[in-house]
Image (tube, rainbow, N blue to C red):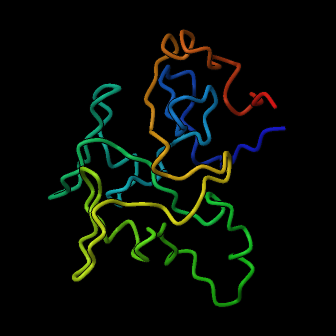
Amino acid sequence: TFFLLTFPYYSIPPHLGLYIGWRCPHYLWDCFRIGNESKCFCGHLLREHQVISDISVPCHVSQCRCLMFCFIPSRPEEVGEFWLKRRATFDPKAWRAQCRCKHSHEDHAATGSHPCKHHGCCCNCFESNFLCAACDRCWEEHETFFETRETRRRGGRPQGTDTVNNWRRPL
């Protein structure tokens, strides 16, 4: 069976006709459904972005340079680190997705290849030190998709009442 991590507050009702998902481009299934409380690489939530079209979702937070919502995991469960919450000293508000350079996504530029902004670090792009909990692939192999029902239908993906929450990946 297929593992799909969903949280009730992450969902955007499919009857609105727009599906927002995060997946590897060559997969038919979404690894995550994206909703208003999902975090962008820029550090702001989807609800702080304006969905203009499927290729234009800029951030509306003052002085943020983000031009397109780009999902980044914001909870350890989203990268398969369920055990972290059991640690007595774990602070879920302090957890951030990390790059191989050991700096968080917030220490990297929100645009382009996401080079590290930390003084003295020569990392020129964000490379995740974690894997997707749904497909075991790196963050950088994924894309955030904004799709209409018709786009999903043409791509062979579930739409309407056959939502991603009920779909199973072939073995």
In the rendered structure, the answer to whether residue 161 lies left or right of residue 62 reads right
Q: Residue furthest bottom?
A: 89
Q: How many discs mark residues in the rendered view?
A: 0
Outermost residue toward the left in this view: 63
Q: Name which quarter of the figure residue 152 lies in.
A: top right
Left-right relation of 18 to 87: left
Q: Position of residue 127 (x, y in %)?
A: 43, 60
Q: Position of residue 160 (x, y in %)?
A: 63, 16
Task: Look at 57% across and 81% down and name the residue there.
Answer: 91
- Quadrant of res 80: bottom right
Q: Indicate whether 90 appears above or below 141.
A: below
Left or right: 95 in relation to 169: left
Position of the N terminus by quadrant: top right
Q: Position of residue 128 (x, y in %)?
A: 48, 61
Q: Residue at x 47, y 45 (%)?
A: 36
Residue at image location 62% in from the left, 14% down from the top: 156
Looking at the rendering, in which quadrant would you find the C terminus? top right
Q: Nearer the viewer, residue 33 or 14?
A: 33
Q: Whole-percent x and y of residue 77?
A: 66, 62
- What residue occupies the far right of the structure in this picture? 1
* Relative vertical location of residue 9 with respect to residue 29 in this rendering, above or below: below
Could you tell me which residue is drawn at 51 percent across and 42 percent down?
Answer: 35
| Residue 106, above or below 125 | below
Judged left or right of residue 102, residue 162 is: right
